[in-house]
Amino acid sequence: MTESTLLHELIAVAAHRTPQAIALTIGPAHVSYADLSASVTQFASGLMGLGLARSERVAIYLEKRFETVIASFGAPAAGAVFVPVNPLLKPEQVAFILRDCNVRVLVTSPERLALMKDALAECHDLRHVIVTDAVAGSASAGAMVFAPLALVNWSDLLASPPQPGHRVIDTDMVAILYTSGSTGKPKGVVLSHRNMVAGAKSVASYLENGAQDTLLAALPLSFDAGFSQLTTAFHAGARVVLLNYLMPRDVLKAMEREGVTGLTAVPPLYIQLAQLEWPAAINDKLRYFANTGGRMPRETLTALRQRVPTARPYLMYGLTEAFRSTYLPPQEVDRRPDSIGKAIPNAEILVLREDGSPCSPEEPGELVHRGALVGMGYWNDAEKTAERYKLLAADAPGRQAGLQLPEYAVFSGDTVRMDAEGFLYFIGRRDEMMKTSGYRVSPTEVEEILYATQMVGECVAFGVDHPTLGHAIHVIATKVVSTGAIDQNALMAECKARMPAYMVPTGIEFVEGPLPRNPNGKIDRKLLSAEWAQRRAA
């Protein structure tokens, strides 16, 4: 095998070329490509032994570790679909994902399983839980009964008799990545083998990744950009350092210790890193640093370039629905630091009016992505899929009148403009999504959790500009009619218990109700947000 067409083949091809090369590093531990490939095959055989059918879902609820990577590629090798779950999510949020895409197998740790025990009772499609270490009090081999799921130890699964996985092709789905939606519930973006492999090859080409590279996986692997560190590295035969960091300084220490040559991160992390002193050894090795997940402040970009003057900066734009859309070449950064660049290789980016016709230079329009990276829609959500994945007009750029079959593209919902030289500039988002600490958060997702506390009457959440977070989440709420006192400390404690840290509001303001409505009878979020901004400016 000399070329990858399926996701798991990225590892197999690299193992064939350089079997003893290091593929993964965590602290002092390393895994070669040969051993990683063997583990992926063993994991796939284990899933087949559990009776997993073609395209059934395997959720992975773990921090970054070897087992996370093995399961993420081993599930596709069995012909299944992997569902990476953000390790910061709370049990109820994880359970929603498991129910939403009918997960059959969950891979997790004993510690996380203990937290999930009650929530799993509602996951009726779940049949097996694979635990990375032995569960206290359980048998050491074989499947174990766990209310009423079958528990399987990781080591036992990898010892299953070899058997081939289901036959799949590159247009079959391989992953469902969950991202928050404007409805308040996470949406599952369905990606094919072709989407992920084409994305890996495209990004690796413009970043010029090679076998000599060492990439730092600092972002969560549940993010498309985070998982991309694996796929691009494996395509190039490079090494990936998996890092679960607590403080920004841990990132710098890992970069120095491991001789990292490529770093991809989100603006909030870069803002923090730019405020620290960087060990001089980083500049000797770092070949590039890439930004994704929002616009990097110019001051931060300037500071980073001063820290590592020999490293090349790549400014990128993407969306989970099409993985990665644009990048700004390093040689253009000084000329147009506010640009999100041009289309990545093997993709075409259009700027279209509402009627589907192309915009003129400098005319604002919607960013539309066409090509091999366009995903397969949202899992089990026809309405949202129809909003984002639409047919291109018959006379759209790249289309010819003689073509009889239609073509779907991703309509991003983002407004951009294109200059006369073809460089794109981001203007704003059409929806009300908040981008905080690199995460996309739906206001109604925050509101639903607040309502679940039964400590607020009405509430509305919105994002406000923040120098390091991107958006800070602010909430305006009314008190519960039946109660007099408002205990904000208790409410914030509930938020911290029920939400990931990045979703916890930075401020909750109580006002007299009811909250104002718009003509449709909904709480007027835009009005409340504008009034809050006016009060702050006064």
Image (cartoon, rainbow, N blue to C red):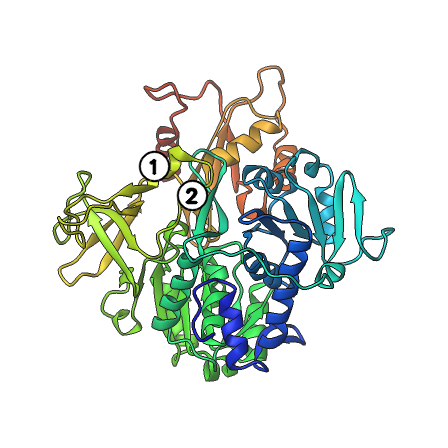
Question: Does residue 491 appear to the left or right of 187 in the view shown?
Answer: right
Question: Does residue 327 appear to the left or right of 284 in the view shown?
Answer: left
Category of crowding for the residue at label 1, using alpha-carbon neighbours closer than 10 angstroms: few (below 14), some (14–19), many (at least 20): some
Which residue bears the numbered disc 2? 434
Q: Please tell me which residue is depicted at 42% across the width and 36% down the height of the picture.
A: 182
Q: Please tell me which residue is depicted at 48% across the width and 62% down the height of the picture.
A: 7
Q: Say which of 461 and 265 sits in front.
A: 265
* CA distance for labels 1 and 2: 22 Å
Residue farthest along the top direction in this orientation: 482
Q: Say which of 289 and 1 sits in front.
A: 1
Q: Quadrant of residue 496?
A: top right
Q: Secondary structure at mark 1?
A: helix
Q: Please tell me which residue is depicted at 53% across the width and 78% down the height of the picture.
A: 16
The percent coordinates of residue 373 (x first, y second) are 36, 56
Q: Quadrant of residue 536?
A: top left
Q: Quadrant of the C terminus?
A: top left
Residue 171 visible at all: yes
Residue type indicated by callout 2: Met
Category of crowding for the residue at label 2, using alpha-carbon neighbours closer than 10 angstroms: few (below 14), some (14–19), many (at least 20): many
Q: Please tell me which residue is depicted at 62% across the width and 29% down the height of the picture.
A: 453
Closer to us: mark 1 or mark 2? 1
Q: Secondary structure at mark 2?
A: strand
Residue type indicated by callout 1: Ala
- Residue 386: which disc? 1
